[in-house]
Amino acid sequence: MAAAETSPRLKARLAGFFYLTTGGTAFAEAIHSNVVDHTSAAVTAHNILSAQALYRFAFAADLAGVASYLVVTALLYGLLRPVSRTMSLLAAFFGLVGVAVQAAAATGYFAPLLILGGAPYLSAFTTAQLQAAALFALDLYAQGFLIALVFFGCYCVLLGYLIFRSSFLPRAIGVLMVIAGLALLLNSVLTFVAPAIAHHLMIFTLGLDGIGELSLMLWLLVVGVNVPKWEALARG
């Protein structure tokens, strides 16, 4: 009986831990922003080649972050299923699609290392062409990441709804997660249709997302869930 009581709390804390490790993606994004110079493919190539070890580590951190988000999605599905099996499944679907898109986009992150790696078959291209191709691959990665954020935004909105309806997690966090998801959606959509506006609002929208997801992560990691209320909902 004791093991059954601690099970949802353990799931919650594991979800919080793996949520924390998704920060590897944020680290990779920071490195991406530092190496890319959209005005010069040559400078971008130089930045990558001069810090290859760090760049490779950032790629590995990105993959770890993607894998961690996969675990978070599975754990939160199990945790929130008593609230609504259908909505939990729909949320998990959006989370998994976001993970798949981000994983596919990550090939663009690693591609510059192959393009600039000096393999013999690449001698058919000039240095300038290879540098341009490397920058293009990084731009594709950035666009793929924005597409993934659309699905993650939907995921956060649905999580927020489920948390708000639950009795074992604070409703305030549910509200913050809905706001976080809407902020992600707004950031991605504006970047596609009105990039100038998106650029000015980026700190605001990503800040709202950060507040919501950080609140959920810390609550899961430190507090967990109200086990009796979770079990009462699961039995009902």
Image (cartoon, grey):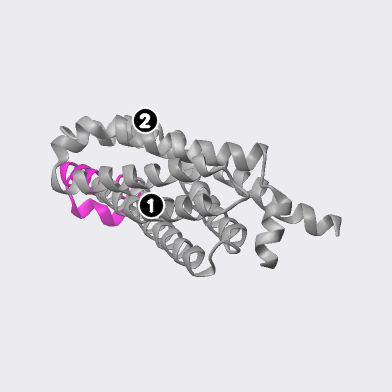
Left or right of 95 on screen, residue 231 = right
* Residue topped by disc 1: 106
Circle 2 residues within 10 Å: few <14, some 14–19, many ≥20: few
Which is more toward the observer, 231 or 212?
A: 231
Q: CA distance from mark 2 to mark 1?
A: 21 Å
In front: mark 2 or mark 1? 1
Q: Quadrant of the image for the N terminus?
A: bottom right
Indicate the quadrant where residue 85 lies: bottom right
Using residue 105 as the reference point, say whether residue 170 is left or right of it: right
Q: Position of residue 136 (x, y in %)?
A: 21, 47
**Residue at screen point 20% across, 44% down:** 191
| Element type where label 2 sits in the image | loop
Residue 4, quarter of picture: bottom right
- Which residue does the image show at 43% across and 38% down from the upper left? 26
Picture coordinates of residue 162 (x, y %)? Answer: 50, 55
What residue is shown at x 24% (from left), y 46% (from top)? 139
Magenta residues?
A: 114-136
Residue 57: x and y in percent read 49, 39
Which label is found at residue 50? Answer: 2
Residue 148 lies in what quarter of the image?
bottom left
